[in-house]
Image (cartoon, rainbow, N blue to C red):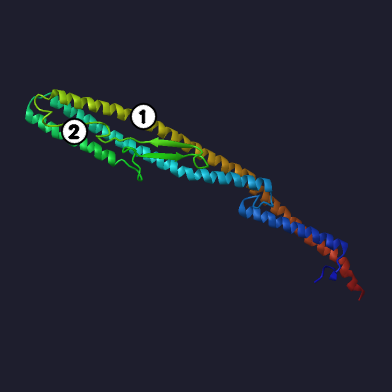
């Protein structure tokens, strides 16, 4: 039907246009109430829409980095657990060396030699068992932790070391060297154990510093993601109380418009009374 096929009075056309505008506003308000957002498309508010999109994209990029940071923390903790266990074994080996020095009996020293070597083999096994998801910081493994949105924008290189008996430069005890007159060899083994303990303490301190950095960056990333999401929400979220009030007023206006349109049509209907 062409636009000019039906002629409306000026009052009816004015009321019709008002109803159409009210209906459009009701649809818009319903969309805001259902989505919870006042800005759902670029047409609603281009500036706020694209700014919010940028915030959410950055938050998503940072969220990806959180998994890597969590894995790095677990990796360092696994290495730290290994260091503590290895330290206990080395201290036990020191006790064995001290016990060997306290006796001159060849048979006893031979037994201590065997015990000492067993502890050293356990040190190497513990180092090998301290890996996490394929990376072992106690067998000279390393891990690069990403913090920034872009690759290689902000990183931390966590370097491991060899915590095996060989890597710690602890030589196995030889029964003939730890003989009844082998005090010099036993003292040498004790010295190697002391050096290994000092080395482990230094490396443990380094790993603790790395752990502190990653933990701090993890907390910062969580806070930054929350800030970005809050900023995006502030730009796009609707006030549901306000929109609810708007809906009530628009429905009232719509009802009044329908009543007004009905009244405006009465003048046209009056023509029927002439027949």
| Badge 2 element | loop
Tell me, yes or no, whether the two marked residues, 2 and 1, touch with CB atoms within 8 Å: no
Q: In this view, does 8 lie to the left or right of 232?
A: right
**Where is residue 15 drawn, in percent x and y?**
82, 60
Q: Is residue 114 above or below residue 57?
A: above
Mark 2 or 1 closer to N-term? 2
- In screen coordinates, is 209 left or right of 49? left
Q: Residue furthest right?
A: 274
Q: In which quarter of the image is the C terminus?
A: bottom right
Q: Mark 1 points at which residue?
A: 205
Q: Quadrant of residue 91?
A: top left
- Can you tell which quarter of the image residue 199 is in? top left
Residue at the (51%, 43%) spot, across then down: 62
Q: Is mark 1 on a helix, strand or loop?
A: helix
3D distance between C-alphas at marks 2 and 1: 27 Å
* In front: label 2 or label 1: 2
Residue nearer the viewer, 74 or 4: 74
What residue would you read off at disc 2? Answer: 172
Measuring from the top left, give residue 206's x and y in whole percent. Answer: 38, 30
Q: Is residue 39 above or below residue 104?
A: below
Quarter assignment of residue 193: top left
Give the x, y percent position of residue 207: 37, 33
Query: Observer-nearest residue: 175 or 210?
Result: 175
Q: Which mark is residue 237?
A: none
- Crowdedness of circle 1 by 10 Å Cα count: few (<14), some, many (20+)? few
Task: State how many labels appear.
Answer: 2
Q: In this view, does 196 lie to the left or right of 7?
A: left
Q: Quadrant of the N terminus?
A: bottom right
Q: In this view, does 140 lie above or below 103?
A: below
At horizontal 34% and vertical 31% (from top left) the residue drawn is: 204
């Amino acid at each position: 039907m062409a636009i000019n096929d039906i002629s409306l009075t000026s009052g009816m056309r004015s009321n019709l246009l008002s109803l159409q505008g009210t209906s459009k506003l009701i649809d818009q308000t319903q969309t805001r109430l259902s989505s919870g957002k006042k800005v759902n498309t670029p047409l609603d508010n281009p500036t706020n829409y694209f700014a919010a999109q940028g915030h959410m994209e950055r938050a998503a990029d940072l969220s990806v980095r959180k998994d890597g940071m969590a894995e790095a923390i677990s990796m360092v903790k696994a290495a730290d657990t290994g260091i503590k266990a290895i330290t206990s074994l080395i201290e036990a080996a020191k006790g064995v060396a001290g016990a060997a020095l306290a006796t001159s009996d060849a048979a006893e020293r031979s037994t201590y030699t065997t015990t000492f070597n067993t502890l050293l083999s356990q040190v190497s096994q513990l180092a090998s068992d301290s890996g996490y998801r394929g990376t072992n910081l106690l067998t000279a493994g390393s891990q690069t932790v990403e913090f920034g949105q872009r690759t290689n924008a902000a990183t931390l290189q966590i370097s491991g070391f060899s915590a095996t008996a060989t890597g710690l430069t602890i030589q196995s005890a030889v029964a003939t060297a730890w003989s009844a007159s082998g005090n010099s060899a036993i003292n040498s083994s004790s010295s190697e154990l002391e050096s290994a303990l000092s080395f482990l303490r230094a490396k443990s301190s380094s790993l603790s510093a790395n752990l502190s950095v990653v933990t701090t960056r993890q907390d910062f990333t969580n806070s930054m993601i929350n800030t970005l999401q809050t900023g995006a929400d502030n730009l796009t979220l609707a006030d549901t109380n306000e929109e609810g009030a708007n809906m009530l007023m628009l429905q009232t206006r719509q009802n009044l418009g329908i009543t007004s349109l009905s009244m405006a049509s009465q003048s046209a209907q009056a023509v029927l009374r002439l027949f």
